Amino acid sequence: MRSLAATLVAGLAYAVSGGVASAQISDDVVKIGVLTDMSSLYADATGKGSLAA
């Protein structure tokens, strides 16, 4: 029963957090934020150079 409650809480948190991130358009300028890893274990895959504008 406890694991079902934990699963439901995790699913609800996941569903609610999807609407938080968004791009901003103001005065014909588009701003997009990027969260990337520059210095830890996964920096080779997701660090510098993994992003192209």
Image (cartoon, rainbow, N blue to C red):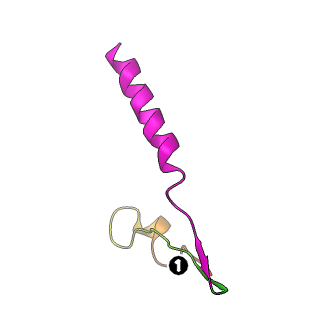
Q: Vertical placement of 30 versus 12: above or below? A: below
Q: Vertical placement of 19 versus 34: above or below? A: above
The extreme right residue here reads 28
Query: In which image quadrant can residue 51 be found?
Result: bottom right
Q: Vertical placement of 21 versus 23: above or below? A: above
For image coordinates 56% across by 64% down, the residue present is 22
In the image, 53: left or right of 43? Answer: right
Q: Is residue 47 magenta?
A: no
Q: Is residue 25 magenta?
A: yes
Q: Residue 15 in the image: state x and y as whole percent.
A: 52, 41
Task: Locate the N terminus by quadrant.
Answer: top left
Callout 1: 10 Å neighbours few (<14), some, many (20+)?
few
Find disc 1 in the rendering and name its residue.
49
Q: Amino acid at mark 1?
A: Gly
Task: Point out the stretch of residues depicted in magenta.
Answer: 1-26
Task: Locate the C terminus by quadrant.
Answer: bottom right
| Magenta segment, prevailing SS (helix, strand or loop) | helix
In the image, 34: left or right of 24? Answer: left
The extreme top residue here reads 1
For image coordinates 54% across by 73% down, the residue present is 50
Between 43 and 1, the one lying in front of the other is 1
Secondary structure of the residue carrying numbered label 1: loop
